Amino acid sequence: MTDKPKVAVHKFASCDGCQLAFLNMGEDILTLAQLVDIVHFVEMGPVNPDASVDIAFIEGSISTPEDAERILRIRANSRYLITVGACATSGGLQALRNFSDGKEWLAAIYAKPEYVQSLSTSTPIARHVKVDLELWGCPVTGSQVLAVVRALLFGVPPWYEKDKVCLECKRRQTVCVMVVKGIPCMGPVTRTGCGALCPSFGRDCYACYGPAENPNAESLARRLEGLGLIPEAVARRFLFINGAAPAFAEAGLKRRGNAHD
């Protein structure tokens, strides 16, 4: 009998929400434990950060010098490296620092900012090492994680959502909040995966699953302005959870620049 594949879950700068997606699987976590040997997952119990593994799941962004060094060691010890969640895939909320003077913020908050070991930017894992697969979401779901593990164990390419939230709304026959109610919505440029959760309750999508495939962010930005949002408000829609994703950053920074002209 061969040993089960080894899996590690590593945390960087994040809120831990994507790690909780593992723990909230319910009975599926038992299924996962039957398929693999989880050798490092601090929130679950096992601690072995330098273990060589078949699959390493990474939550969080690179925000400190120590982070930048640690991710190199993890990559060297991993056959497959998979990022989970907005922080790991695009920098997350903390990437808002990328659009400001990080040293100025530290000086305004801390009496001794020289003792804070922090980078001036918060960057996705792919900026530092090769990433084999990205799972978008804030947070991801346990079903996403389990589906990826099963696919890799069976030797097939993992399948993941690339459609827009708008298509998910149509599949579920959810009334479009932007067309019917005039509510500014990020659905036309956002990757589905949540099941169009927010529109199904009559509210707008706020892009927690990041840019969809081929998003026309500039076109949506103009539409949001047509619905009455000022440039600064449009910028905030894009420069939010996945603001450092290139498609969103470009549209958001353009509007923020217009607002300050």
Image: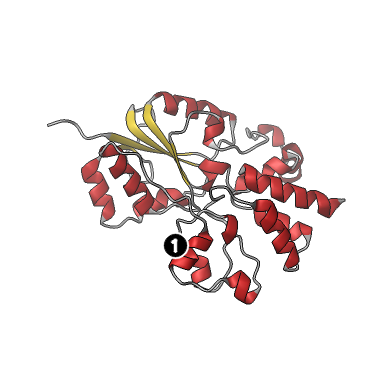
Where, by quadrant of the figure, is residue 90 drawn? top right
Can residue 104 be spotted in the picture?
yes
56, 233: nearer the viewer = 233
Would you place residue 99 above or below residue 167 in this image?
Answer: above
Q: Which residue occupies 29% across, 57% down?
A: 26
Where, by quadrant of the figure, is residue 40 drawn? top left
The amino acid type, in three-letter code, at marker 1 is Gly
Q: Report x, y in % for residue 222.
A: 73, 59
Q: Residues within 10 Å of mark 1 (few under 14, many from 20)?
A: few
Q: The N terminus appears in which quarter of the rendering?
A: top left
Left or right: where does residue 170 sit relative to residue 177? left
Q: Which residue occupies 75% across, 40% down?
A: 101
**Residue at the right extreme?**
261
Left or right: where does residue 259 sit relative to residue 103? right
Q: Report x, y in % for residue 211.
A: 57, 50
Can residue 206 be spotted in the picture?
no
Please state the total of marks drawn on the protein image: 1
Would you place residue 246 above or below residue 20 in this image?
Answer: above
Q: Report x, y in % for residue 204.
A: 59, 67
Q: Please name the colour scheme applied to the rendered image.
A: secondary structure
In the rendered image, which residue does mark 1 sit on?
195
Would you place residue 85 above or below residue 176 in this image?
Answer: above
At numbered mark 1, what does the secondary structure look like: helix, strand or loop?
Answer: loop
